[in-house]
Image (tube, rainbow, N blue to C red):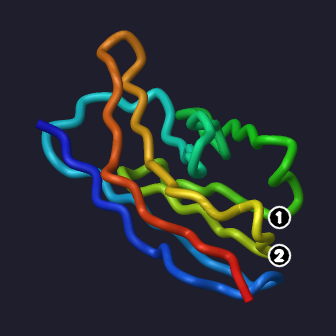
């Protein structure tokens, strides 16, 4: 069984920064991609950033140039560096592990609140 442990959320002022971490543990044979999604109140969950096993990353247009996803040494940990945060970035952020044809796993979510 695979577990995802997220950390790094919190309250930050507009223009501030946060770094989210997601560590996977358990029996993991192959990871196709790791990513971050977010869900704001009353809205659907949306992709924020995703990085595949070959290092290719994609970002939502709303975060390009401000957020950076990384997965050092292609290990079982993924980070999301969030800079120049805006109030509209407020949401619960979820880590996602994509095992390709073997399914996926979600973290429990971490709250990010951007407010003065």
Q: Which mark is residue 66?
A: 1
Q: Is residue 112 left or right of residue 100?
A: right
- Relative vertical location of residue 55 with respect to residue 12 in this rendering, above or below: above
- Relative vertical location of residue 80 with respect to residue 57 in this rendering, above or below: below
Q: Residues within 10 Å of mark 2 (few under 14, many from 20)?
A: some
Q: Give me the residue at 46% from left, 27% from top.
A: 32
Residue found at the far top of this picture? 101
- Relative vertical location of residue 88 with respect to residue 9 in this rendering, above or below: above
Q: Along the line of sight, which residue is nearer the eye, 76 or 13?
A: 13
- Relative vertical location of residue 23 with respect to residue 105 in this rendering, above or below: below
Q: Position of residue 30 (x, y in %)?
A: 33, 28
Q: Position of residue 33 (x, y in %)?
A: 50, 33
Q: Residues within 10 Å of mark 1 (few under 14, many from 20)?
A: few
Q: Which mark is residue 84?
A: 2
Q: Position of residue 86 (x, y in %)?
A: 80, 70
Q: Along the line of sight, which residue is nearer the eye, 16 or 80?
A: 16
Do callouts 1 and 2 mark residues in contact (Cβ within 8 Å)?
Answer: yes
Mark 1 vs 2, N-terminal side: 1
Q: Quadrant of residue 26?
A: top left
Judged from the image, the secondary structure of the residue bearing numbered disc 1 is loop
Mark 1–mark 2 Cα distance, whole angstroms, equals: 6 Å
Q: Position of residue 55 (x, y in %)?
A: 64, 40
Q: Quadrant of residue 59?
A: top right
Q: Give me the residue at 71% from left, 62% from top.
A: 89
Q: Is residue 49 left or right of residue 93?
A: right
């Amino acid at each position: 069984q695979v577990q995802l442990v997220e950390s790094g959320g919190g309250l930050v002022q507009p223009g501030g920064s946060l770094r989210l971490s997601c560590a996977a543990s358990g029996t993991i044979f192959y990871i196709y991609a790791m990513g971050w999604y977010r869900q704001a109140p009353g809205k659907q969950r949306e992709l924020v950033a995703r990085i595949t096993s070959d290092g290719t990353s994609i970002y939502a247009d709303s975060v390009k140039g401000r957020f950076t996803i990384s997965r050092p040494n292609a290990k079982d940990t993924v980070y999301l560096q969030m800079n120049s945060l805006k109030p509209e970035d407020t949401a619960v952020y979820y880590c996602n592990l994509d095992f390709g044809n073997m399914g996926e796993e979600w973290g429990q979510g971490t709250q990010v609140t951007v407010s003065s």
